[in-house]
Amino acid sequence: MSFPPEFMWGAATSAYQVEGAVAEDGRAPSIWDTFTAEDGGESGAVACDHYHRWPADADLMAGLGMNAYRFSLAWPRIVPRGTGPVNPAGLDHYDRMIDGLLERGITPVPTLYHWDLPQALQDRGGWTSRATADAFAAYTDVCLDAFGDRVRTWLTVNEPWVVSVLGYRLGLHAPGERDLRTSVHVAHHLLLAHGLAMGRIRERRPEARAGIPLSLFPSYPATDADTAASWASDGYTNRWFLDPVLRGEYPADMAALFEELVGPLDFVRPGDLDLIGTRPDLIGVNYYTRRRIAAAPHDGLPWRVLPAEDGVPVTESGWEDVPEAFHDLLVRLHRDYGIPLLITENGGVWNAGPDAGGRVRDTGRTLALRRHLLAMSRAMDAGANVLGYTHWSLLDNLEWAEGYAQRFGLIHVDRSTQERRVKDSGHYYARVIAAGEVVEIEGDE
Ligand code: FCB
């Protein structure tokens, strides 16, 4: 199948993972600066130095034929204290970058929030405070006024499930808390922030399209006896976010489960679900892997996620590499929610580095890319309205708490010299984009 000519082809990054320059031009610290300093992990202080090197990176994208770039705007650069004064140097940076992308024929697709909450807001409660959702709406206004003349596709809050669960239940991400009730509370405020931002976008930029990028994990029961547990796990990762955004209600089965586990969800106020249910134009689909589920209580929840199944291919970080689950997810989203989809993230860890001749043979990524694009194209044949695909990631970058050891890039980044090298997967992707169809892998590509 050929892809439509207006299909968006690109790659994705986020500010803290690639920019570096954390103390430059008036940027204030974010919760990720604090978290990486406290847990002694690698930080985004330098990252890929994309803050300075974006013009060369944009040249690389254009050279590969990409026509879209998903990146994130750093709230701590634009409104450094979270609320209050706007930092003109922060706006100037993204102003230049957006212009530079457009000059190269690349559509800018900014995410308003990709996890780098201004530390000043964290000091006032962060996402446990409703006021943070209001602060996000005000920051959204600033971005709409500054860039809305050129940006036609907006993404709001990246992966509220990951923020609320890894950041507030499992303690793995900033700010490192571990409490289920807080996690559900924070998820609500993140959804509220999304809903408020949707309202601002509708009001100030009615011509723009917008949506929320969700981390979606299709659940599969390990055996028939695990079917109900698998549906609950789906409720936890997927429906808890899809249903309020697209139907204006929390799924009743999950609301009952959470009330049983953590008490009344009394932080949901009248009118909140109407705001959250402001119909978006698209859902951003971040798909990496599936979850295999067994009905066995684990870590305070009534199911367990099983390790990779024997015989199923895995990435170098151990995630099951299952393109069929991607196909099924896209078809299901189309069937259950009837909403256009933008694939805002898809990819995996393959750590190949340059060989003696400087070539990066990341064969695993190339194969996975081709198989996921085929799965996507079959889902489109089955009716899913997919608007575009931005691969995670453009560059090897800071994989949050995992540091720099996990390489997701189509482009290799040498950590000591910052030298960029397009990997074999990047060259393969360029051939797909040029052909407008999922071409065969050539020779030893
Ligand atoms: C997603 C994040 C993204 C990146 C990928 C691998 O959960 O949105 O920033 O870290 O995972």
Image (cartoon, rainbow, N blue to C red):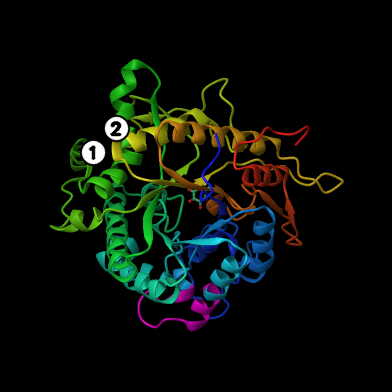
Q: Which residue lies furthest to the top in this view?
A: 224
Q: Can residue 271 be seen in this view?
A: yes
Q: Mark 1 points at which residue?
A: 254
Q: Which amino acid does label 2 sit on?
A: Ala
Residue 80 within the segment the image draws in magenta: yes
Which picture quadrant has residue 66?
bottom right
Q: In which quarter of the image is residue 304?
A: top left
- SS for tag 2? helix
Residue in the picture at 31% in, 46% down: 241
Residue 82 lies in the magenta-colored region: yes
Residue 156, position as x, y percentages in the image: 38, 59
Which mark sits nearer the N-terminus, 2 or 1? 2
x, y percent for residue 243: 26, 43
> Element type at marker 1?
helix
Left or right side of 197 for 373: right
Q: Are marks 2 and 1 in contact (CB under 8 Å)?
A: yes
The label shown at residue 242 is: none
Callout 1 amino acid: Met
Residue 232 numbered mark, or none: 2
Residue at x 65%, y 35% (from the top left corner) = 439
Q: Nearer the viewer, residue 264 or 280?
A: 280
Where residue 135 appears, x then y in whole percent? 32, 71
Q: Position of residue 110 (x, y in %)?
A: 47, 62
Q: In which quarter of the image is the N terminus?
A: top right
Q: What segment carries the magenta color?
A: 77-94
Crowding near pointer 1: few (<14 within 10 Å), some, many (20+)? some
> Does the beta carbon of the residue at mark 2 sit less than 8 Å from ligand 1?
no
Q: Which of 346 and 418 is in front in this view?
A: 346
